[in-house]
Amino acid sequence: MKVSNKLCVSRLYMYRKALSRFKQMGCIKIFSDNLADGIGVTSSQVRKDFSIFGLSGNKKGGYLVEDLIQKLDEILGKNKPQRVIVIGAGNIGTALMKYKAFVKEGLEIAAAFDTDSAKVDRADEIPVLPLSELADFVRQNDIRVGIIAVPDIVAQEVLNVMISAGIRGALNFAPIRLNVPEDFIINNVNVGVELETVIYMVNALDRRPGNE
Amino acid sequence: MKVSNKLCVSRLYMYRKALSRFKQMGCIKIFSDNLADGIGVTSSQVRKDFSIFGLSGNKKGGYLVEDLIQKLDEILGKNKPQRVIVIGAGNIGTALMKYKAFVKEGLEIAAAFDTDSAKVDRADEIPVLPLSELADFVRQNDIRVGIIAVPDIVAQEVLNVMISAGIRGALNFAPIRLNVPEDFIINNVNVGVELETVIYMVNALDRRPGNE
């Protein structure tokens, strides 16, 4: 199963982040326009997203910041810590292990896994373990989500190991399409394609007669 | 200006990658169904994308692999090397500098920039330069696209430096919404939100009665 409602769920996370900022600024109440400006969508989009997830304002219009934060946390499961694993302790995997923004968001990387025994380091703050220990670790720590940060040629193999270990969803950085069962969640981040899209759009803008 | 036609352009890059694989396998001719299977969309989506960009098949149906590759390269500007810069030589920036998939795609990181003088390294394969040299470098090397890999609190400041230096588009990894002029292309990759989306979807799947 591919991430379908992805865009809408992504926006919920962005609303949640914007709400934290409004709270820090001392705001008690906010309006859909505030949230719209905060994340760069229209206010009708905010109201549409909120109605899909059953989030309502108060009678006089607007939303109570604290109330909305609590409701969003409940929907997003942010009231419990989210522990994930990384597969591949190379450049991308290591960068993710040190990524401070994860901690801020209540995301915790419980361990990394690699087939290269030179990368194994059980004493590190985030231990790097042999891939052969993945299944046991996942079972013992009730891990459900993993990040794939391995070269594309081994990505499917690694994903199969994750699936048999009981992992239910993955964020995939390997620039390749992976085959997953219907009930497995896969979300692909292809950094190369994202960069090329920017390059293409810049070039396209130049080619336009009006240079709009 | 935000990336609007983004999804469609992204697919063109994926078609291009799939075509390389088909070529390697010795295929001379392919059909929209082949490409659809290769990147995981419907064949009508392939035909729709191709018609938007004026790509047509031959009279007997199907497309000549080599012909399609050439036409796509022309549209995507892949027939010339694409040189970009990275701003921020921290974890994410360094990982991107070592990211082999970029090289495969004809993407070249010309230099990285950082305000931390301890990170400056002019002798490295990809030099790390002081941020103060960005404007000169961009001008001398005709750089148009940059990758923002700095902490969110300095991202807007860094973006402003890039814009005044003449950069036209950016891939932004800082988890914050940046203000850009109308004619600037910005593409945000929020790794935290992408991961949280997977976690949310896995949890949502569990909560469903039928466990679809």
Image: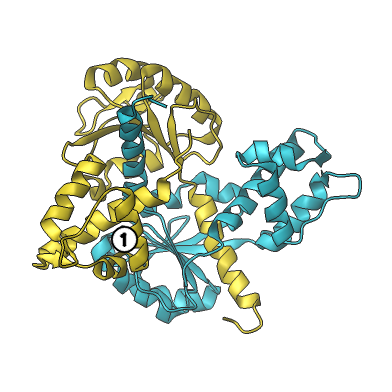
Chain colours: A yellow, B cyan
The kind of secondary structure element at disc 1 is helix
Question: Residue A11 falls in which quadrant of the image?
Answer: bottom left
Quick check: A154 above or below A25? above
Q: In the current view of this chain or complex, which residue is farthest to the front?
A: A59
Q: For this view, does A113 lie left or right of residue A27?
A: right
> Residue A113 at x, y = what percent?
35, 27
Q: Residues within 10 Å of mark 1 (few under 14, many from 20)?
A: some
Question: Residue at left 19%, top 66%?
Answer: A62
Q: In the current view of this chain or complex, which residue is farthest to the bottom?
A: A210
Question: Residue at left 14%, top 60%?
Answer: A65
> Residue B14 at x, y = what percent?
62, 47
Q: Which residue is mark 1?
A: A47
Instruction: Report the number of numbered marks.
Output: 1
Quick check: A160 above or below A79? above
Question: Residue at left 65%, top 76%?
Answer: A207
Does residue B78 appear in the picture of this structure?
yes
> Residue B101 at x, y = what percent?
54, 45
